[in-house]
Image: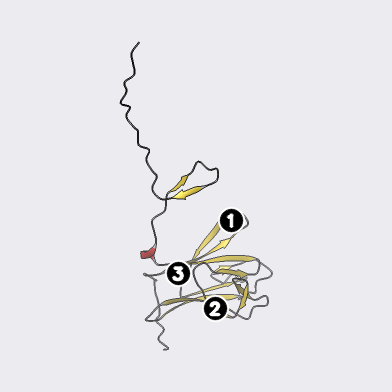
Amino acid sequence: MFGILILEPLANKMALIIQLTESGAGIKLALEKQRTTIGRDTSNDINLDDELVSKKHAVIEIIATEDEIKFLIQDLNSTNHTFVNDSLIELHKLKDGDLIRIGMSDFRFISQDPDSMDETAQLYKTWIPGVFYTGKKKKKSKKKSSKKKAKK
Protein backbone atom coordinates (compact mmCIF):
# COMPACT_ATOMS: atom_id res chain seq x y z
CA MET A 1 0.00 0.00 0.00
CA PHE A 2 3.03 2.37 -0.05
CA GLY A 3 1.65 4.50 2.82
CA ILE A 4 -0.93 6.19 0.58
CA LEU A 5 -4.30 7.08 2.07
CA ILE A 6 -7.47 7.39 0.03
CA LEU A 7 -9.14 10.75 0.59
CA GLU A 8 -12.83 11.34 0.32
CA PRO A 9 -13.36 15.05 0.95
CA LEU A 10 -10.18 16.93 1.79
CA ALA A 11 -11.23 18.57 5.01
CA ASN A 12 -7.88 20.02 6.00
CA LYS A 13 -6.39 21.17 2.70
CA MET A 14 -7.86 23.05 -0.24
CA ALA A 15 -6.40 23.42 -3.70
CA LEU A 16 -7.51 24.85 -6.98
CA ILE A 17 -6.19 25.85 -10.34
CA ILE A 18 -7.13 29.15 -11.90
CA GLN A 19 -7.32 29.22 -15.69
CA LEU A 20 -5.67 32.50 -16.65
CA THR A 21 -7.15 34.62 -19.42
CA GLU A 22 -5.84 37.58 -21.42
CA SER A 23 -7.91 39.98 -19.32
CA GLY A 24 -6.27 38.66 -16.15
CA ALA A 25 -9.53 37.36 -14.68
CA GLY A 26 -9.49 33.63 -14.21
CA ILE A 27 -11.81 30.66 -13.99
CA LYS A 28 -11.40 28.88 -10.64
CA LEU A 29 -11.41 25.09 -10.83
CA ALA A 30 -11.44 23.32 -7.45
CA LEU A 31 -9.37 20.14 -7.12
CA GLU A 32 -11.83 18.15 -5.04
CA LYS A 33 -11.34 14.69 -6.51
CA GLN A 34 -8.36 12.46 -5.80
CA ARG A 35 -7.68 12.30 -9.56
CA THR A 36 -8.52 15.21 -11.90
CA THR A 37 -8.01 14.55 -15.61
CA ILE A 38 -7.27 17.28 -18.15
CA GLY A 39 -7.58 16.93 -21.91
CA ARG A 40 -9.47 17.62 -25.13
CA ASP A 41 -11.88 14.67 -24.75
CA THR A 42 -15.21 15.54 -23.13
CA SER A 43 -14.81 12.67 -20.65
CA ASN A 44 -12.08 14.63 -18.81
CA ASP A 45 -12.82 16.51 -15.59
CA ILE A 46 -11.30 19.62 -17.20
CA ASN A 47 -12.08 19.72 -20.91
CA LEU A 48 -9.97 22.06 -23.08
CA ASP A 49 -11.21 22.81 -26.59
CA ASP A 50 -7.73 23.26 -28.06
CA GLU A 51 -6.12 21.35 -30.96
CA LEU A 52 -2.74 21.48 -29.16
CA VAL A 53 -4.17 19.47 -26.24
CA SER A 54 -4.22 15.67 -26.41
CA LYS A 55 -7.45 13.77 -25.71
CA LYS A 56 -5.94 12.53 -22.42
CA HIS A 57 -3.26 15.15 -21.75
CA ALA A 58 -2.47 15.30 -18.02
CA VAL A 59 -3.74 14.33 -14.59
CA ILE A 60 -3.48 16.01 -11.18
CA GLU A 61 -3.49 13.54 -8.30
CA ILE A 62 -3.80 14.15 -4.58
CA ILE A 63 -1.55 11.87 -2.54
CA ALA A 64 -1.89 11.83 1.23
CA THR A 65 0.74 10.33 3.50
CA GLU A 66 0.93 10.49 7.26
CA ASP A 67 3.17 13.58 6.98
CA GLU A 68 1.64 15.63 4.18
CA ILE A 69 -0.78 16.01 1.32
CA LYS A 70 0.91 16.31 -2.09
CA PHE A 71 -0.51 17.48 -5.38
CA LEU A 72 1.20 15.81 -8.33
CA ILE A 73 0.75 16.61 -12.01
CA GLN A 74 1.66 13.98 -14.57
CA ASP A 75 1.84 14.30 -18.33
CA LEU A 76 0.07 11.35 -19.98
CA ASN A 77 2.53 11.04 -22.90
CA SER A 78 0.83 13.94 -24.66
CA THR A 79 1.99 15.12 -28.07
CA ASN A 80 2.71 18.72 -27.01
CA HIS A 81 3.74 17.99 -23.41
CA THR A 82 2.86 19.64 -20.11
CA PHE A 83 4.91 22.49 -18.66
CA VAL A 84 5.25 23.76 -15.10
CA ASN A 85 6.98 27.13 -14.67
CA ASP A 86 8.12 26.86 -18.33
CA SER A 87 9.88 23.52 -17.71
CA LEU A 88 8.76 20.36 -19.53
CA ILE A 89 7.59 17.77 -16.98
CA GLU A 90 6.62 14.13 -16.86
CA LEU A 91 5.77 14.10 -13.14
CA HIS A 92 5.96 17.15 -10.88
CA LYS A 93 5.03 17.94 -7.27
CA LEU A 94 3.01 21.15 -7.43
CA LYS A 95 3.77 24.05 -5.11
CA ASP A 96 1.60 27.06 -4.36
CA GLY A 97 1.88 29.56 -7.21
CA ASP A 98 3.17 27.13 -9.88
CA LEU A 99 2.23 28.05 -13.46
CA ILE A 100 0.93 25.09 -15.49
CA ARG A 101 0.77 25.28 -19.30
CA ILE A 102 -1.27 22.78 -21.30
CA GLY A 103 -1.67 23.65 -24.98
CA MET A 104 -2.64 27.32 -25.19
CA SER A 105 -4.05 27.35 -21.64
CA ASP A 106 -2.24 28.62 -18.56
CA PHE A 107 -3.28 27.70 -15.03
CA ARG A 108 -2.04 28.95 -11.65
CA PHE A 109 -1.96 26.28 -8.91
CA ILE A 110 -3.17 27.55 -5.53
CA SER A 111 -2.78 25.39 -2.42
CA GLN A 112 -4.10 26.71 0.87
CA ASP A 113 -4.70 25.45 4.36
CA PRO A 114 -8.02 26.90 5.50
CA ASP A 115 -6.53 27.59 8.96
CA SER A 116 -3.75 29.72 7.47
CA MET A 117 -5.97 31.92 5.33
CA ASP A 118 -5.72 35.52 6.51
CA GLU A 119 -8.62 37.89 6.56
CA THR A 120 -9.00 40.09 3.54
CA ALA A 121 -6.73 43.11 3.94
CA GLN A 122 -8.16 46.60 3.58
CA LEU A 123 -6.51 48.64 0.81
CA TYR A 124 -5.98 52.38 1.38
CA LYS A 125 -5.08 55.10 -1.11
CA THR A 126 -2.17 57.45 -0.44
CA TRP A 127 -1.73 61.01 -1.61
CA ILE A 128 0.75 59.70 -4.21
CA PRO A 129 -1.11 58.74 -7.41
CA GLY A 130 -1.18 54.97 -7.93
CA VAL A 131 0.30 54.12 -4.50
CA PHE A 132 -1.74 52.09 -2.02
CA TYR A 133 -1.05 50.38 1.30
CA THR A 134 -2.68 47.77 3.50
CA GLY A 135 -3.19 48.01 7.23
CA LYS A 136 -5.02 50.24 9.61
CA LYS A 137 -6.03 53.65 8.43
CA LYS A 138 -4.59 56.40 10.56
CA LYS A 139 -7.25 58.62 12.01
CA LYS A 140 -6.65 62.31 11.84
CA SER A 141 -6.87 63.90 15.23
CA LYS A 142 -8.64 67.22 15.34
CA LYS A 143 -6.93 69.77 17.53
CA LYS A 144 -9.19 72.00 19.49
CA SER A 145 -8.31 75.60 19.17
CA SER A 146 -7.66 77.33 22.46
CA LYS A 147 -8.45 80.67 20.91
CA LYS A 148 -12.08 81.57 20.60
CA LYS A 149 -13.19 83.46 17.59
CA ALA A 150 -13.80 87.04 18.37
CA LYS A 151 -17.32 88.17 17.83
CA LYS A 152 -17.77 91.36 15.91
Residue 92's tag is: 2
Q: Are the residues flagged by discs 1 and 3 in contact, CB closer than 8 Å?
A: no
Residue 23 image-quadrant placement: bottom right
Amino acid on which the number 3 mark rests in the picture: Glu
Q: Which residue is mark 1?
A: 24
Which residue is outermost to the bottom? 1
Amino acid on which the number 2 mark rests in the picture: His
Give the tally of numbered discs. 3
Going from the N terminus, do you reach mark 1 or mark 3 first? 1
Give the residue drawn at x 30%, y 26%.
Answer: 146
Which residue is outermost to the top? 152
Residue 10 image-quadrant placement: bottom left
One can see residue 49 in this view: no
Q: Which residue is mark 3?
A: 32
Measured as percent of width and height from the top left, residue 6 is found at: 40, 80
Name the quadrant of the N terminus.
bottom left
Measured as percent of width and height from the top left, residue 113 is found at: 40, 67
What SS does tag 1 mark?
Answer: loop
Q: Are the residues flagged by discs 1 and 2 in contact, CB closer than 8 Å?
A: no
